[in-house]
Amino acid sequence: MTAEYVGLGDWTAEALAVPGEVRPVVSAPDPVLGRPGSEVDPISDEVVRLAADLVATMRVSPGCVGLAAPQVGVSAQMFAVDITGHPKAVTVHGTFVLCNARVVEASRWKAGREGCMSVPDLTGDVKRASRLVVEGVLPGTGAPVRLVTDGFEARALQHEIDHCAGLLFLDRVAGAHAIYQRKVYL
């Protein structure tokens, strides 16, 4: 992939052209959450259906800004993100799904509170890059993507990429002092 910004182009979740089904979200300590996902073929029918399912599941889950394949029981490197309308949003790319994504640049590290649908009772303070460049592939088209983002969207991307690597936000907290009981359930 070239060093230039590629972006999402005109890709939308509707471009998947299959209806998404809502899937149940697994909770820790389900073993699928603790193992690295396999790379996927972004143009396979199975991956396109999974992409649509991730978007559908994310959309019906209050407060959800991202959902990775391991969270619906599939050990794969694929996730959906949409921070549109979130009060902490700065840069917003809308709803998108990435396959086989990886961080290529990370800077401006800051601690921030995170929660997770797969760890429903806890939140934690996690240090993440607030400026990020991620490369991946769009499902359905197989088009390469290079997203440049910051702030809350950067945090969401890192959280979902961690899921694809078999990590939870709890694996990134500084210690027990940085883990809290969730006070509000969305």
Image (tube, helix red, strand yellow):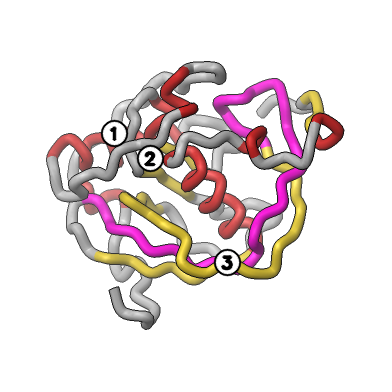
Report the residue marked by disc 2: 55
How busy is the neighbourhood of tag 2: few (under 14 within 10 Å), some, or many (20 plus)? many
Q: Nearer the viewer, residue 39 or 185?
A: 39
Does the magenta portion include 117? Answer: yes
Quadrant occupied by the N terminus: bottom left
Residue 159's disc is: none
Cβ atoms at labels 3 and 1 below 8 Å apart: no
**Amino acid type, mark 1:** Gly
* Amino acid carrying mark 2 in the image: Val
Image coords of residue 83 (percent x, y)? 55, 52
Main SS category, magenta section = strand
* Residue 58 spot, x, y in % from top left: 46, 36
Residue visible at 22% across and 40% down? 47
Q: Look at the numbered discs 1 and 2 and tell me whether their residues touch, using CB distance below 8 Å.
A: yes
Which residue shows up at 40% across the image and 26% down it? 72
Q: Name the quadrant of the C terminus.
A: top right
Of the residues under marks 1 and 2, which one precedes in the sequence? 1
Residue, disc 1: 20
Q: Secondary structure at mark 3?
A: strand
- Horizontal and vertical percent for residue 85? 60, 53
Q: Is residue 122 magenta?
A: yes
Marks 3 and 1 sit apart, C-alpha to C-alpha, by 32 Å
Q: Where on the picture, by quarter, is residue 149?
A: bottom right
Q: Magenta residues? A: 115-139
Decide: is 32 above or below 37: above
> Where does label 3 land, which residue?
106
The crowding category of the residue bearing disc 3, from other C-alpha atoms within 10 Å (few below 14, some 14 to 19, many at least 20), is: some
